[in-house]
Amino acid sequence: MKYFSIGEVAAEFNIPESTLRYYEKKGLLPQIERDEAGRRLFSEDHLGLLGTVICLKNTNMPISRIKQYIDWVVDGDTTTALRLEMMRTHKQAVLAEISLMTEAVGGIDWKIDRYVKRMQEKNNESEE
Amino acid sequence: MKYFSIGEVAAEFNIPESTLRYYEKKGLLPQIERDEAGRRLFSEDHLGLLGTVICLKNTNMPISRIKQYIDWVVDGDTTTALRLEMMRTHKQAVLAEISLMTEAVGGIDWKIDRYVKRMQEKNNESEE
DNA sequence: ATACGACTTAAACCGTGGTTTAAGTCAACA
DNA sequence: TGTTGACTTAAACCACGGTTTAAGTCGTAT
């Protein structure tokens, strides 16, 4: 099985190594092996897990909750129902936030329109 | 002109009074008048401004940048072009974040599907 | 008169999510 | 042999966005 150094993983996902260490410490990347010199060896599984962590982070799930999810993943198939429920709940929260932001974009557009018109008026005046 | 107490504004927008005081201190709500006893008097204009602040906050604009925007509003029409550019830039950032989240919802959906199937399999097994 | 509720202040405090620092280990290359 | 470069650790530090605390001032209702 192929393993990756922390530097490779950091480059691959374009995040600082310090963040990877921080995630491990917080329990988001469990059971990372080490080589003889104590250096982390990330497996393919860890890359997948990290992808999931980043996905959840991108949707503003707090670290403590991501940890809960990862703990359940580690626990195996007995936690499928719990994970399913968490993902369904989270999806609803994300959709709610997307609508909030989409609504706000409407307000921003409204301002943009006003400013564009104001700029046009200013230009017209200067041509008179 | 009608004025509103901090309690009324807090209730209207459903945010703590402490947050309104914090926003004033940070410069997001400028030129709030006071009554003889030193209590804040929010004008209708302030309600509008607060709506804008909340809109920008809902789209994750940092306080320092919201303050810049408000400063420009206070400066008047000479800053229209600056505000226009800021709103256009911000809109692009918000749209980018919305797509990031929308993409993440795809990943979440994928997990939901897997877990649903896994649950169904488990139920089938228990019926054998 | 007094007690209550709504308000005031400055300053201290808090959780979140990392980032930075300092000191050290190790492998490989000149 | 010695000096890079990639890694290790624990602990300190940071920005952000508020929230809480403590002590005090009003206006009004009983």
Image (tube, coloured by chain):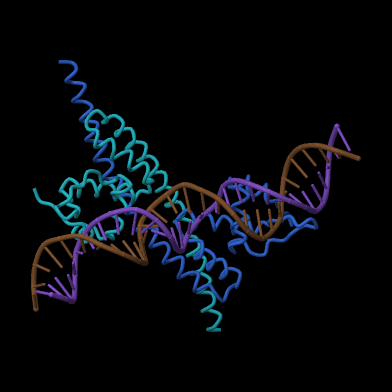
Chain colours: A blue, B cyan, C purple, D brown
Question: Residue, x 62% and y 60% (percent of image)?
Answer: A24
Picture layout, residue B108 above or below residue C1: above
Question: Residue, x 21% and y 47% (percent of image)?
Answer: B32
Q: Among all residues in the image, which is located at the extreme top?
A: A128
Residue closer to the observer: B65 or C5: C5
Horizontal and vertical percent position of residue B33: 18, 47
Total marks shown come to 0
Image check: A72 left or right of C5?
A: right
Image check: A51 left or right of D6?
A: left
Question: Residue, x 21% and y 25% (percent of image)?
Answer: A120
Horizontal and vertical percent position of residue A128: 15, 15
Among the 4 quarters of the image, the one containing residue A111: top left
Picture layout, residue B80 above or below residue D12: above
Horizontal and vertical percent position of residue A97: 36, 56
Picture layout, residue B55 above or below residue A91: above
| Residue A55 visible at all | no
| Residue B25 visible at all | yes
Residue closer to the observer: B6 or D4: B6
Q: Quadrant of the C terminus of chain B?
A: bottom right
Question: Residue, x 40% and y 42% (percent of image)?
Answer: B93
Horizontal and vertical percent position of residue B75: 24, 33
Among the 4 quarters of the image, the one containing residue A53: bottom right
